[in-house]
């Protein structure tokens, strides 16, 4: 092996370097200097993210066990942006809550390890690497969900997450072993060729899919979502709702559209049903939520259903619409979670009722929330509209008009509960609204990036075209 | 090694252990009285559940043991073929050990290795 | 001969797994699980995968069961006896299990894993050479990723388990004269 070839794995190696540097800093620095780790971590990851966007390369390493190309590079870079915003928004929380308890750097380290697992999962050329990446991306998150373990609800979130995640991993592994039993190979490229489309492969695929669907929180596998989002620290919930879900969507896309052509009929039907179920049930449950974190959790479930619409076409447009929607969803959802986090950190309130009259005391936060919610709902000038528009176009061009109708109805339902929050913030008057909340600089920077993303992606039409061009070769 | 050897081993194990137990049951003189069933031969009889809740420290040690157990497992095949595979194998094993060594250092610094 | 051992081991695994699931005492379940994991190591030895058998014994039987037993002993109420579920739940769960098993057996009989090659000779040399081979058919990348996985898990476990200590530590300091 030529050592220069390792440059193909630049993304992973960079992140590994960041992880190792921060671990060394944690070991080296004494207790009082620990708060310096926050700017250090943010700076290092910022450099990693910026350098990650450059020079997309294409090739294989380790005998095809690792592969990368322009599209995979784009997926990783999108995940990078999301993680950067998440840790930026967590900066103030880390300083206020974690620094006194001397566990700042672990928060970053766990998030990054999980991200590294996602890199390897998306880049895997081999089912073994897919599974290993899946594990590496899941296990640290369980620790993160229980990060405030002395709070009962956080501990509960952690235990719920690790139990369901363990079950999902076991089911995935069973699916992989059935696929291996039927085809005799782990290598993804051979897997597609060896498949005969028999029922054993179908069962193996369904098991594998169930494990991934747990991470995307599609409907029969979504029960952990609201409890974990509610109990876990808000940053972790944001991470779960965007990054974790995004990586799982990406790997599903790569496997289904790239390597399992024989099973297309099967999974299109499965996803057709699950998309309807996920959208509808997610939205209907979101209607009755009063706790904002739970509401956002069910909204995330419903959005996952929308993402599944893109799988109806395995052509270029399907892939491009999924990736574009993930990018848009990332900015919108992180903005909403950022506002919730700011309010919760300073006042401890997280119910819709507490947000009444928020506009009078905190006009800027309310405006950010308004933009985020409108983008999630898909109101025209904002990016969210185009994200949904391209997904609907995919469904329409694939000819599933019933599904399209249900999706449009669901968009209207979702608009209702997003507007409930907007009404509470802008129209309701409250005798004792929340006091003025001054967010810290990092959170502000994170929110500004999100808002810029929401507005810019809605205006710039070139982004979708660029993604579309990259999707030509998966 | 044939499977016959294993069978013989199994049978021998069952016969020797089981035979010993049966023989002692048959041959040994027994005397029973209720006091022999007490948990202690002296002191006050215990009341309520006698199990105590373990400290979390045990768990921490167990998990650290498990992690380095796994590391050891992965290093065994490397150690066997170390001479044949040359520099690449050496470097990759060193990276492996260094990353886990960093973990050990971290555990040390976090006082996870101290019994409290 | 091998068949006899295979069926003995299978019977042991099946009965012990059932007992592990059905037992209403946590600690007993863990001990039955230990039996299951050991018997699985027997399978590996039977098909000549000695290294894998040793791994099964050291990691699963030796490490994970100890971990499970420790975590059971960490709970408040070790003697806690799980309530027996009502018969309707048992019936539903049993029916689902039987249905799943029937479906599985049907599927497995239809296709006999024909494409999987017969296991090659797998002594430690082969394992080592394959594990550390960076080229095609080698597993060097997973080998390295495992180290990162272990590091991440170690950090996660320490930061969660140590937290109670740090809080406990801080309170006596405040009370100290």
Image (cartoon, rainbow, N blue to C red):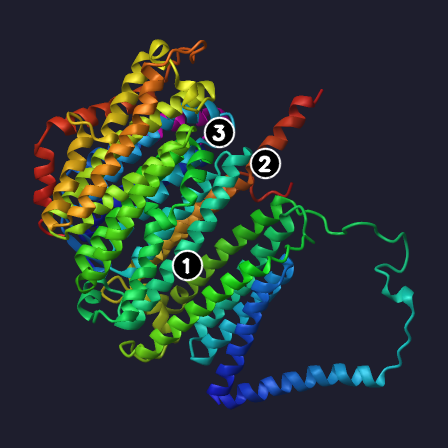
Mark whose residue sits in front, 1 or 2:
1
The residue that label 2 is drawn on is C164
| Residue A283 x, y percent position in the rendering | 32, 37
The label on residue A30 is 3
How many neighbours does mark 1 have within 10 angstroms: few (below 14), some (14-19), or many (20 or more)?
some
The residue that label 1 is drawn on is A170
Q: For this view, does A201 lie left or right of residue B100? A: left
Residue A88 makes an appearance in the image: no
Chain letter for the residue marked with disc 2 in the picture: C
**Up-down relation of residue C16 to residue A369 (above or below):** below
| Residue C94 x, y percent position in the rendering | 51, 65
- Identify the image quadrant of residue A345: top left
Q: Residue at x 35, y 12 (%)?
A: A362
Asked if the residue under mark 3 is in contact with the one under mark 2, i.e. CB atoms within 8 Å, the reply is no
| Residue A179 x, y percent position in the rendering | 29, 67
- For the residues tagged 1 and 3, is the chain the same? yes
Chain letter for the residue marked with disc 1 in the picture: A
The label on residue A459 is none
């Amino acid at each position: 092996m030529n050592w220069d070839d390792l440059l193909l794995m630049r993304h992973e190696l960079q992140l590994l370097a960041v992880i190792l540097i921060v671990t060394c800093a944690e070991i080296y620095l004494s207790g009082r200097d620990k708060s310096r780790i926050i700017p250090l971590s943010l700076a290092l990851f910022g450099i990693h993210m910026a350098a990650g966007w450059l020079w997309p390369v294409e090739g294989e390493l380790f005998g095809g066990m690792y592969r990368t190309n322009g599209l995979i590079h784009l997926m990783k870079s999108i995940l990078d942006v999301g993680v950067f915003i998440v840790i930026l928004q967590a900066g103030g929380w880390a300083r206020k809550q974690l620094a006194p308890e001397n566990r700042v750097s672990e928060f970053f380290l766990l998030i990054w390890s999980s991200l590294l697992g996602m890199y390897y999962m998306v880049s895997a050329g081999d089912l073994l690497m897919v599974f290993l990446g899946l594990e590496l991306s899941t296990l640290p998150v369980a620790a993160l969900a229980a990060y405030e373990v002395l709070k009962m609800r956080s501990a509960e979130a952690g235990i719920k997450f690790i139990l369901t995640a363990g079950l999902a991993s076991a089911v995935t592994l069973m699916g992989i072993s059935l696929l291996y039993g039927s085809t005799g190979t782990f290598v993804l490229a051979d897997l597609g060729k060896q498949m005969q489309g028999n029922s054993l492969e179908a069962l193996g695929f369904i098991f594998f899919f169930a494990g991934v669907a747990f991470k995307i929180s599609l409907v029969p596998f979504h029960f952990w979502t609201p409890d974990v989002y509610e109990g876990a620290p808000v940053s972790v919930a944001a991470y779960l709702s965007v990054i974790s879900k995004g990586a799982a969507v990406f790997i599903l896309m790569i496997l289904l559209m790239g390597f399992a052509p024989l099973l297309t009929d099967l999974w299109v039907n499965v996803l057709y049903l699950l998309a309807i179920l996920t959208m509808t049930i997610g939205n209907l449950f979101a209607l009755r939520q009063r706790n904002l974190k739970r509401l956002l959790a069910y909204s995330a479930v419903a959005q996952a259903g929308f993402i599944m619409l893109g799988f109806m076409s395995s052509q270029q447009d399907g892939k491009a619409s999924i990736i574009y929607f993930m990018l848009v969803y990332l900015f919108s959802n992180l903005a909403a979670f950022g506002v919730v986090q700011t309010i919760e950190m300073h006042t401890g309130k997280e119910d819709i009722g507490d947000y009444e009259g928020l506009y009078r005391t905190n006009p800027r936060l309310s405006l950010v929330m308004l933009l985020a919610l409108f983008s999630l709902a898909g109101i025209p000038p904002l990016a969210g509209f185009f994200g949904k528009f391209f997904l609907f176009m995919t469904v329409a061009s694939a000819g599933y008009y019933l599904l399209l109708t249900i999706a449009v109805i669901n968009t209207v339902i979702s608009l209702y509960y997003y507007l409930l929050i907007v009404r509470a913030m802008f129209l309701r008057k409250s005798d004792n609204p929340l006091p003025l909340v001054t967010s810290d600089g990092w959170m502000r920077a994170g929110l500004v990036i999100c808002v810029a993303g929401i507005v810019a992606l809605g205006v710039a039409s070139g982004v979708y075209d660029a993604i579309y061009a990259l999707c030509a070769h998966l | 090694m044939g499977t016959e050897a294993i069978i013989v081993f199994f049978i021998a194990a069952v016969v020797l252990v089981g035979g010993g137990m049966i023989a002692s049951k048959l041959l040994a003189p027994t005397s029973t009285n209720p006091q022999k069933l007490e948990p202690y031969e002296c002191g006050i009889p215990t009341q309520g559940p006698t199990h105590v809740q373990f400290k979390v420290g045990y768990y921490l040690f167990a998990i650290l043991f498990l992690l380095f157990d796994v590391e050891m497992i992965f290093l065994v095949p490397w150690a066997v073929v170390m001479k044949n595979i040359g520099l690449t194998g050496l470097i990759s094993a060193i990276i492996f050990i260094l990353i886990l060594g960093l973990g050990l250092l971290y555990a040390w610094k976090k006082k996870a290795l101290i019994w409290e | 001969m091998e068949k006899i051992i295979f069926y003995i081991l299978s019977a042991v695994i099946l009965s012990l797994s059932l007992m592990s699931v059905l037992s209403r005492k946590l600690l007993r379940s863990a001990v039955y699980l230990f039996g299951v994991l050991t018997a699985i190591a027997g399978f590996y030895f039977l098909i000549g995968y000695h290294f894998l058998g040793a791994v099964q014994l050291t990691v699963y039987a030796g490490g994970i069961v100890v971990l499970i037993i420790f975590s059971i002993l960490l709970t408040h109420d070790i003697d806690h006896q799980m309530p027996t579920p009502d018969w309707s739940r048992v019936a539903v769960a049993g029916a689902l299990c039987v249905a799943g098993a029937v479906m599985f057996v049907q599927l497995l009989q239809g296709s006999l894993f024909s494409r999987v090659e017969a296991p090659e000779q797998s002594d430690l040399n082969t394992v080592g050479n394959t594990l550390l081979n960076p080229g095609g058919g080698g597993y060097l990348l997973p080998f390295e990723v495992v180290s990162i996985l272990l590091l991440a898990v170690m950090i996660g476990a320490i930061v969660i388990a140590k937290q109670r200590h740090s809080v406990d530590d801080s309170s006596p300091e405040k009370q100290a004269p």
